[in-house]
Image (spheres, rainbow, N blue to C red):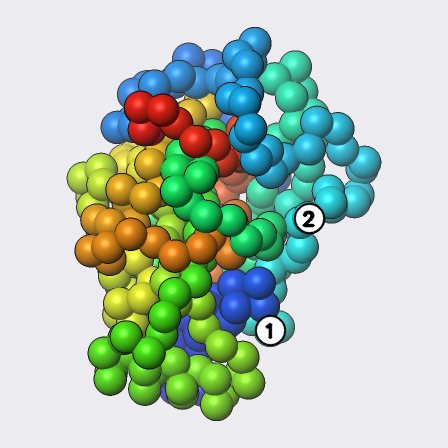
Amino acid sequence: IHRPRRHMLRWVLLALAFSLAACTSMEAGPGADSGNVRDTSRQGRTVPEGALVLFPKEVEPGELPAGWEKWVIHPLKRKTDYGFKRDKGGVYLEARSRSSASGLIYRLDVDPAAFDTLEFSWMVSNLLEGADAAERESEDSPVRVVLAFDGDKSTLPAREKAFFERVKLFTRQDMPYATLMYIWDNARPLDTLIANPHTSRVQKLVASTGPGGLKTWQLHRRNIVEDYRKAYGKAPGRLIGVAIMTDTDNTGTMTQARYRDLILYKSRAGAQ
């Protein structure tokens, strides 16, 4: 496959996933502030009433928790290794990526207005040398938390409709109306939005940046309604999927990352 078309195929398969509904060691410790980071652990804190908790309280070795499925980006790409584990802070997901790209998906169908706050923690061992989220040749990220939204596709511009039709013709599946990704970028300012080069219906938002806070837990709280408005200029439709992905396939690098505290809830005052 010609190089530009190969990278287009990668994004087509990324969007399709939602339509279907030993590296450097890390030690947890006090984390450097990274924009929306306010704490480094939920340990000892009460989960908000009515929260949708996506990670389980307990895990069975070698098994995916209820609700989670493997997210295959491309059948020929090496898969990132994922494993749910437990420490004194609770259950976390460990990802080990070596020139690989795959993820895990949790499908759901909720009104974002009723769950306007997304809370998640991540910890990264290292930045990815040569990674650039704006370039299709090198747009890897050591961590991603990805949201997929439903919406009225008939209102989209002709260019986007044509792209959606090409995707459907190639995959026989529909793309989601809109996708929003939280990523860790090498250098861009926090809250920078980065559009996919092939479609504006996939937007990446920089939630952590640079080397500050590596190897420490970073707890984020995001108002997904406000972030969606920033990315797309209006209120979101229903939230139909949440995914996690650590990928290093384009840069040919390796990393280790951890995720925990993945919850959705209604915040009286909005996200902090």
**Which corner quadrant of the image does residue 115 belong to?**
top left
Element assignment for label 2: loop
Tag 2: Cα neighbours inside 10 Å, few (<14), some, or many (≥20)? few
- The quarter in which the N terminus is drawn is bottom left
Residue 24 or 179: which is nearer the viewer? 179
- The quarter in which the C terminus is drawn is top left
According to the image, label 1 marks what residue? 76
Task: Please state if 223 lies on the left or on the right of 72 as rendered.
Answer: left
Q: Tag 2 or tag 1, which sits nearer the N-term?
A: 2
Task: Please state if 226 lies on the left or on the right of 224 as rendered.
Answer: left
As drawn, 167 above or below 132? below
Q: Residue at x 31, y 66 (%)?
A: 201
**In the orientation shown, which residue stands out farthest toward the bottom?**
169
Residue 214 or 122: which is nearer the viewer? 122
Q: Residue at x 25, y 61 (%)?
A: 195
As drawn, 225 above or below 24? below
Element assignment for label 1: loop
According to the image, label 2 marks what residue? 67
Q: Amino acid at mark 1?
A: Leu
Q: Amino acid at mark 2?
A: Gly
Marks 1 and 2 sit apart, C-alpha to C-alpha, by 25 Å
Residue 258 placed where, x, y %? 54, 34
**In the orientation shown, which residue stands out farthest toward the top?**
44
Residue 50 placed where, x, y %? 55, 28
